[in-house]
Image (tube, coloured by chain):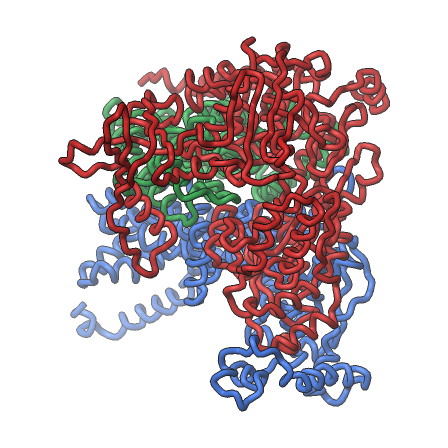
Chain colours: A blue, B green, C red
Amino acid sequence: MNQFPSNPPPHTARYEALLTEAERIKGVSLGRDAWRRLRRNWAAMASLGFLVVLSLLSFFVPLLPLQSPKEGNLEQRAFEPPNLAKHSLDLVAMLAPKPPAGALPKKADSEVNAPELRNEGNVPEKADSAKPAAAKADPTKPAATIANDKKSVDSPYDIRVKALWDEPNVIDRAMIRVRVAIFRDWCVPSICGTDQLGRDLLSRLFWGSRVSLIVGVVATLVSLVIGVSYGAIAGYVGGWVDDAMMRIVDVLYSIPFIFVVIYLITILDEPSIKTWLLKHGVDKIVIFYFVIGAIFWLTMARVVRGQVISLKQEQFVEAARAVGAGKARIIFRHLVPNLMSVVIVYLTLTVPSVMLFEAFLSYLGLGVDPPGVSWGILASEGVQAINPIKTSWWLVVFPGLALGMTLLALNLLGDALRDALDPRLKNR
Amino acid sequence: MIQFLAKRLAWMVLTLWVVFTFSFFLMRAVPGGPFSEERKLDPDVKRNIERRYHLNEPLYQQYAEQLWSAMQLDLGPSMRMSDFTVNEIIAAGFPVSATLGILALSFALALGIITGIVAALYRQTTTDVGMMTAATIGIAVPNFWLASVCIVLFVFVLPIFPAAGWGSPWQLVLPVFCLGAPYAGYIARLTRTGMLDVLSQDYIRTARAKGLSPARVVVHHALKGAMLPVVSFLGPAAADILTGSLIVETIFFLPGLGRNFIQSATQRDYPVAMGLVLVYTVILYVLNTVVDMSYRFLDPRVKLQ
Amino acid sequence: MYRPGRTLFPYLALAAVGLALVWSTTFSTLPQADFTFINGTELKSIDPARVTGVPEGRIVGALLEGLYRPDPKTLQPLPGMAVQHDLSSDRKTYTFHLRSNALWSDGTRVTAEDFRWSWQRMLHPETGSEYASLLGECVVGADQYHRGAVKVGNRVEIELEDRPNPAEPFPTGTILRSKVLAIDKPPEPKIPKGTSEDDEDKIKDAWKAKWQYTVEIDGQRQKYCKQPPAGDAQIKKCRQVLLDFSEVGIKAPDPATFEVTLLNPTPYFIYLAQFFPLCPVQRACVEKYGYPNWTKAGNIVTNGAYRLEFRRFRDRIRMRKSSNYWDAEHVQINVADALAVESPATGLNMYLDNQVEWTEAPPSAVIPELENRIDYLAKPSLAIYFYRMNVTQKPLDNMLVRRALNLAVNKESLCKNLLRAGQQPALSFVPPGLPGYEPASAGEYNIDKAQDLLRQAGFPGGQGLDRIEILFNGDGGDHRDIAQKIGSDWEKNLGVRVGYKGIEWNSYLAAVRQLSYSVSRNGWTGDYPDPNTFLGLFVSNGEQNSTGWKNPRYDQLIADAAREVDAKKRLQMFHDAERILMDEMPVLPVYSYVSVNMVKPYVKGFYPNAQDLHPLRDLSIDAAERRKYFQAKGTP
């Protein structure tokens, strides 16, 4: 190295030439190469496109001009086959307090105000026994105002929104406002038919996609975090630690997990525990993430461990160790990034199994509670509607299609990624 | 070999103990006793029943007693279906699930391996894409959905098979198909990948160069190597088929372990649920051991530890 | 290196497949039964003292026969083991005369002693019969015997610790009979506040076990105790201290006479005499094999129209006609199979596929398609679907809110559009159809009135109301759909926000019992045709109350009705009680059930009835019509 400065200029030119050449042929990184090969696989690209569109749609579902996923019309619309009949949300009329650009019909105005007037007129008459606790504390105030102090009064619009969409969160409510501003009361007709309670299946499918996708993705991420850390640590540390850790995995592998899941979900569903959990913001979907995630990490741990064992013989690990990097740093800074290809493939293949598992749990009656909805619930409702005499085929076909197509896309993408990321298949 | 088996056996006993302990406390943690009935029992009466099942004793004592009797292979009476003992229930359900499982697995293997080989040989043709898409669809469809559609199609639209029940081989066709289909899909994909790996290896090239017929190359040389991933999948798959059969068993009304399992778990039938978990654990362990041993037969490079 | 395993492996796998195939074919050797039906869930037991369910009732009723048996058309008592009975002038003593040609399947005669012992066994605390309260409520001394309640001066039976099988109450250990002279109780333990009901029971139980009973046996005063204090040899250990059964109003003076003495004139007692939990079991058989072995096919001795041929768990029960049955010549079906199919959809599939002759409760979605068929048999039944409301919780502690909720449910539409089998919207808790009884109505669907009530309660337009959660057990789609329909009515009509929670059956029962719910769905089937089976549930300390609701006047009316001799006055008392129940509305009646059966047209003797009872012995198969039916279908 120290010869360099002593060497005369002609050499510099040569090195520079070499350097520029090296820069020019720097070559493609593994990721870019994989992407190039992936792009050639039309099935995978179609799947990827489908999944991206699906995720966007399911995130922005309140923006779409869909019917209510929750409010049905049992009397007139139960088991309607797919049709193009018009349907209105009956929501714009409720916007009275803040009419957007004065576009409100007059008839609606009176409808909105009437109940409010009636309410106020009747407040003082209410029965004594029924006074809310707060009313006793301050007898001069009418009870309704006190209730209002506690919670701001819901406008008819808010009440209607809650009736249509089951207490949407802030983001969803904003999206619903935008949707109402753009599409007014217009909705897409029930092109997928309606269910036994007269609810629009199309809308339920879109809202259900949220739960299904979120459960699939988050549970997989949970399993990923556990699996990668566990596998990487076991593989890197090696020796008796590895032995012990892998034995634990073996033992866990031998437990029929469906059993554990059924029990965990029943335990966590028990009213007293559930109330406590809800107080801490843990609802059934969150429980799903963790319970399912806690099962699917085993395979990940094994795969990662295998990879790490082979990787840790590599020179870059030696180099890192030589410059004095700590174990944790080597594992999480050097080894884990190199596992990305395995991990990505595993991810795309685990999401569908998790989604299937969710469907399976829904079939057993352990799914999310109504009015929440997931594809698993829709599919199992469809299955219950199957009979030889009268098959409401749309209840069977559409949820099946939605679930099947998504899982198919994930599987195809997973396969293609595995092929694309496999260095042995490079340039083939 | 014997040392390997002995080691495995020791691990199995340990696993069983862990599973026993884990499920024992898990089950006891579920609120609502096993005897919650619609008609509330008089406290005195309730205590008498609890005494029969030792539920009135301290938890550790129950644990010790049950562990002891489980070690003697006596799992006690069922709490819900009290005319039967757990051993009787397992003995009645096992043949059904085993028949169903073996047939489904054989079906999945036969269909999967053939499809996989064909797809690998005709790589990146329409045949390959079509077969692999079919396999992926098979994996992607929930089996309760598949089963229901099959019932509509093959029982009512085309009255070929009986709707449900257990008694004749004819009644097994649909359940075996519905149970085996996803695994056939997996196996097809694994076989294809395995075949592709193997076909690019030197020894295959050598075999081809020797002038062996393509069929002989595939069957005698390539297949054995290509089966490794399939074999390693078989262990978990067999276990999955056993547990996964619970939906199929319910839909087709088959009196197997899966249906008993789901019912006992949701009905809080502690002894039955526990017994079935232990049975499943043993089966899983045995299958995994068999798989590990079969590695050795299939790949001479593998040494058993 | 040669390894035999490598070549053997594929063959072994093949052999396993072959074996499985052969195995599966061995099951087909089962000959077809003459009559196959779907019997719902697997039976908990076939021991009449242990079961409560409808599926169990069908099988027990086929295997065993009580004093009377129900007429398949009218449900009125027909002669069974008893030919007739005499009723004393105070209407409190029933004397049943047993038939002389009644035989057990082993050929021995069915005697009054069989009944006495069977009823004693049912009442014995260690048998744990859920239906023991049926006798406990109306028979003299039965409740005391069942609860082990003993007072000074009572005659008691003291059972010593020498039972052949400690887990079984019968055969008993040595029994000593005597009068109780004194009971020494240690000071009653203090129960700390906040103790759960279960723990409280346990503390009390431990305390009661230390009670010392002083009795005189063979002229000597002796002390007995379940848990004698250590070191005191004077006090002897015993297993049970129960009221002497001779003090209970159940007696068998001679083999053909069975005598029951009641606390009150109980008009529905005659229906209990045909109720399956009160069927007799054979003492010799039970004591010889012990439970559960005596219920096994080879061991069980029956007195009904059928014998148990075999049971395959979660598959089927096969029964064969018993030649020893007194009326065997009128029993038409020789071999009957009861299948344990839980899912109504599977049941319907098997029925339509001609695998079974009778199935019940097809899924509601297909009922419009089925109801015009000749084999569709529906009949309103004596059962109510209702919502319990937890009156200890806000806002349901307010009677006006509860009434508003009731009036805001469009039950008519629920029945017509969702349930579809002709269920009747329930306006009262007691379903219609009890002879002479006029139910008290809770008011029809009326949105204005409901909103008015809610306003009076202080929640105009639903403002200020907490979210109300409907709890249901998650095993079927119907409960969920019904809850969502009712919830959406509440949301739409009252502005109440509604949540839903579906949980597993046992957690659900626990939640209902511990009052950790706001609104929960329930069903109740009448055990006998009398308002008492419904209204008796909601007395203040009723085991089934589970709403936190109490009303002393209601309790008084129910208690008075039990003592009332005049039938008309009695029913009026029940009506008044129901009026209170419906005004205060701790329970919201939703609809009264309809029993739906699909029965092949060639099955004769099947009559829809209010309790949905269809004794197997009265069914028959018209062979000619059966042939015609299958010829028309084109299948063998």
Residue in view at x 60 percent, y 65 percent = C498
Q: Residue furthest left?
A: C231
Numbered label tally: 0
In the displayed structure, would residue C403 be above or below residue C47?
below
Closer to the camera in the image, A304 or B89: B89
Q: Position of residue A64 (x, y in %)?
A: 68, 69
Q: Give the side of residue C387 with respect to residue A318, left or right.
A: right
Q: Give the side of residue A65 with respect to residue B236, left or right.
A: right
**Visible residue check, residue A407:** yes
Closer to the camera in the image, A116 or C182: C182
Q: Quadrant of the N terminus of chain C?
A: top left
Q: Quadrant of the C terminus of chain C?
A: top right
Q: Position of residue B36 (x, y in %)?
A: 47, 44
Q: Position of residue B33 (x, y in %)?
A: 42, 45
Q: Give the side of residue A143 with respect to residue B79, left or right.
A: right
In the displayed structure, would residue C484 be above or below residue B232?
below
Q: Position of residue A72 (x, y in %)?
A: 72, 61
**Visible residue check, residue B253:** no
Residue in view at x 62 percent, y 38 percent = B131
In the displayed structure, would residue A94 be above or below residue B162?
below
Q: Give the side of residue C26 with respect to residue C245, left or right.
A: right
Closer to the camera in the image, C469 or A416: C469
Closer to the camera in the image, C282 or C451: C282
